[in-house]
Amino acid sequence: MSSDTFDAYAPERETTEGKVYTVTGGDWDTLLDEEHDDRIVINMGPQHPSTHGVLRLVLELEGETVQQARSVIGYLHTGIEKNCEYRNWTQGVTFVTRMDYLAPIFNEVGYCLAVEKLLGVEVPRRAQVARVLLMEINRIGSHLVALATGGMELGALTGMTAGFREREEVLHLLEFLTGLRMNHAFVRPGGLAQDLPDGWEERVAEFIAVMRKRLPDYDRLLTVQPIWRQRMENVGYLPVDGCLALGATGPILRAAGLPWDMRKVEPYCGYEEYDFEVPVATEADCYARFRLRVAEIHESLKIIEQAAAKMEPGPVMIADRKIAWPAQLSVASDGMGNSLEHVRKIMGQSMESLIHHFKLVTEGFSVPAGQVYTAVESPRGELGYHLVSDGGTRPVRVHVRDPSFVNLQTMPAMSEGGMVADVIAAVASIDPVMGGVDR
């Protein structure tokens, strides 16, 4: 007997096999055996405030206790990985930046590092430092959204408004630095699309001052708030062995006691030169993950300060005529803005530059045959890129190890045996972004 014969408020029905209870959601068969005759199956989502996007949770309940939890994904599938196979290597940046839309810079850097590894090139130092600067600003913005949405889902609405208020500061700064609030496509294979704008040092310093002034508000609003702690402590417990078995990384793994951070264990973009700590907790619950993200915001501010101090004059695009556009090479060499007039000037001075620019824009550059895997530490954990090249101007395969997808597998382990209300806290502490899960 299918559950679609019932409506959401139908009374229980009698059958020859026992009692049948109403199943909300409408597409899971009713459980008829004795073992499950006191259980109901409900859907949380796919458009539920606690699901962090278009995620559907199928929960089997006995009273208010979750006996079984399953994730149903795919509602936001965009085919980004497949689409990258039909674009040249540079155009791929505009696709991958749209996956984890709360951490676009990390996708751009991870993808470009993989392309550069296949090419066997290293970007200029100024571009490396700028990448670190942008990633840490982006990390703060992503963590602020995690705190804000978690507060909203658990009823701490003042924490939500504070989180989105500070996130606006992040987006304003990223818009000033890259030209866009999201989906920047600012990091390119070989370096950056263009140099940072004039006055970036002052804007970054203002941002750091604002954040350090406002961050203590989160301790007053949430960290020591008794209701917040009661909703978070000893909820969504997942110890380190469970994290390792399920492949969880990022704040989930570090909140269980293992200081695994790609910036430390396999440094990239010169992270080995920066002085920062990897926050770790041992409670392995939702509250530990919350506190860890707040601590990581403080560490990111330290890295941003150091990156600003390390920034030296120089090019932001590798001086390779086979990779960089002529206009980018000129901007890198003389520090001029990448204006339309300047591009026209370069194009008008050299027919060779005009032809080279045309071929790079229409066809792209070739990448030696081979395959490579690179990983960066995104706000949600290890973000890995596996790229395969056949020697042409387009990738044969682009596969992404998105931490949201992997970390979401921890949801049943965190939720089963707990109360249905605690599922919301557990999902909030995972902080999945469905653009990265479905991609």
Image: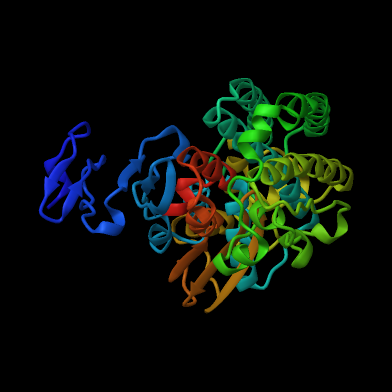
Residue 8 shown left or right of residue 357 in the figure: left
Residue 33 shown left or right of residue 353 in the figure: left
Name the spot of residue 1 as percent of width and height, x first.
12, 52
Q: Residue at x 44, y 56 (%)?
A: 362
Front residue of 208/36: it is 36
Residue 268 shown left or right of residue 433 in the figure: right
Q: Residue at x 24, y 43 (%)?
A: 23
Name the spot of residue 101 as percent of width and height, x first.
52, 43
Front residue of 397/217: it is 217
Say if 280 sits above or below 387 in the image.
Answer: above
Front residue of 355/25: it is 25
Q: Which color scheme did the rendering employ for the protein?
A: rainbow
Say if 393 sits above or below 380 in the image.
Answer: below
Residue 95 shown left or right of residue 146 in the figure: left
Name the spot of residue 26 as percent of width and height, x first.
21, 43
Say if 316 sits above or below 385 in the image.
Answer: above
Q: Residue at x 39, y 42 (%)?
A: 63
Q: Residue at x 47, y 36 (%)?
A: 50
Front residue of 358/190: it is 190
Q: Would you say residue 48 is visible in this rendering?
A: yes
Name the spot of residue 267 as percent of width and height, x first.
76, 64
Q: Would you say residue 350 is visible in this rendering?
A: no
Residue 294 quadrant: top right
Say if 335 sits above or below 203 in the image.
Answer: below
